[in-house]
Amino acid sequence: MSSIMEELLAQSSFDKLREGAIVPGVITEIRQHEVVVDIGGKSEGIVNASEFVDVGELQIGSTIDVFVEKIEDKNGSPLISFDKAEQKKNWDNILTKFPEGSVAAGRVKAKVKGGLIVSIGVDSFLPASHIDIQPPKNLDQYVGQTYDFKVIKINLDRKNIVLSRRDLIEEQRTSKRRNLLDSIQPGQVRKGVVKNITDFGAFVDLDGMDGLLHITDMSWGRISHPSEMVKQGEEIQVMVIEVNREKERVSLGLKQTTKNPWDEIDRKFPVGAKVRGKVVNLVPYGAFVEIEPGVEGLVHITEMSWTKRITKPSELLKVGQEVDAVVLGIQKEEQKISLGLRQLEPNPWDMVRHNYPTGARVRGRVRNMTTYGAFIELEEGIDGMVHVSDMSWTRKVNHPSEVLKKGDEVDALVLDVDPTQQRISLGMKQLASDPWSDIDAHFKIGDVVQGTVTKITSFGAFLDLKDGIDGLVHISQISEDRVEKIKDLLKHGQEVSARVIKIDRDERRLGLSIKAANYSADQLAAETASFEAINRDAANDMMNLGDILDEAAGKKE
């Protein structure tokens, strides 16, 4: 062919090159990021490799259609696009191929404001709210992926197509939900994905619908929050517990997929067995210890120590601590186990009878007092109790504070030991002899004695004599003259002389007379006889009245 002819042919093909036209071109070179195409112009055009779905499928020498954007750019090369040629060709048949409501396969090309650009042959817009049922936070993960989309809107004038992936997913879910509700049965074990977690449980996606896994059905043991058992996005095996087809609700269980550890509890943890566990909860009355997943035992506060006075479990234990314990009892039906910590050690009370035999003399410190006695600490955790009646032979003690105060060192005698009740009875008065056992050696009727006024009542005055013995001066024995008010003649703490006119062994009290202190023997005999005659019936009542007043006065104090 002559060179003139070639020039004419080239001229004629170059004439076809007008802006906005689709022309065929031959691939002459495939580079890493671009494809070189000869469209018969003065120079070759460049197409970006990203415009092709797969550059690896292109071959040198093959022909493709390209869109002419400019015949010459500033370098004199044509500006061409393969993608725009495809788009222009596709727009002509897009309505017949993908009418509104149809499903189209497309590849996500790029992320733009508010959504994604998807190519279904032509560029279309996928709003972010239509990507999935829950709008994703990161859109970059979709770029380059291929999915099916539903065409929801076409605007030919603006060449604008809107797609939805969410609509397809929802339609599939509706269909799957129907199938799931038809087939699902209580007792089945199904696979599911944890969708979201709340305070009361977790919602599990069963691929078609969500089921509720309640916190109480997650573990045979105690959990405080569902997040301890499951994580969002985790795939788990769950058992179907209940299906409500009308309300389209499914209840699920996680613990039901494992054996209930309480079924064989008495075989695994017999009474008396030593166990190891972790403290999972502290309450005012004790500590809960997990001895295996799903099995907790209670160590009651009274089973923590033989001797320490524990007021709250946190004094001894903390949550998370590993402890050894002894099984004390099992209530299988109620899923309760009683544990003890103190049973790991010998009971010091077993040695009490040996260490503190009856009759032994002991020494201790006053730890506490009540209305009826004082507690004496003999060793750490071992107390003995002195009753008010065992504090003095001669004095009526209404409250231990009359004789003792907290912290006092006290000597006493062991009267009785009861290890089962963890009780030791002590006596202070038993260390001394009872002066009333041989009162005649101390006092005889007719003796003149010195005493101190300790109490004044309406019927007489009480005197404290030697050896702590009490004497009562009846109102008739204070003065020769009639006495209206004893307080007019006697004062508390006053030292007086008196004569013993009666010894009352039952009441452990002496009858005294101040006026008779200076009597002669003959006068004394006559006075004693008259006192006996007048007061034979009244004396005991008066003594009892004195006791009642003592007690009333003690309570007031």
Image (cartoon, rainbow, N blue to C red):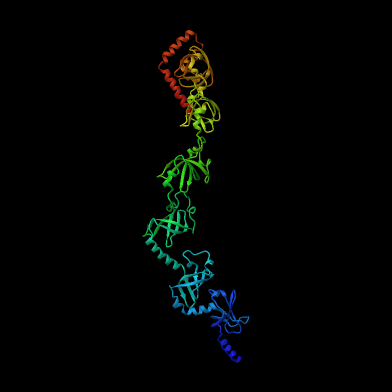
In the image, residue 247 lies at what x, y percent? 38, 59
> Is residue 374 in sight in this rendering?
no
Which quadrant holds the N terminus? bottom right
In the image, residue 177 lies at what x, y percent? 40, 63
In the rendered view, would you say 376 is above or below 177? above
> Which residue is more in the foreground, 466 or 500?
466
Residue at the top extreme of this rendering: 522
In the image, residue 513 lies at what x, y percent? 48, 15
> Which residue is more in the foreground, 361 or 338?
338
In the rendered view, would you say 354 is above or below 184? above
Is residue 329 toward the left or the right of residue 9 in the image?
left
> Is residue 25 in sight in this rendering?
yes
Disc count in the image?
0
In the rendered view, would you say 16 is above or below 306? below
Residue at the left extreme of this rendering: 246
In the image, residue 519 lies at what x, y percent? 50, 10
> Which residue is more in the foreground, 120 or 329?
329
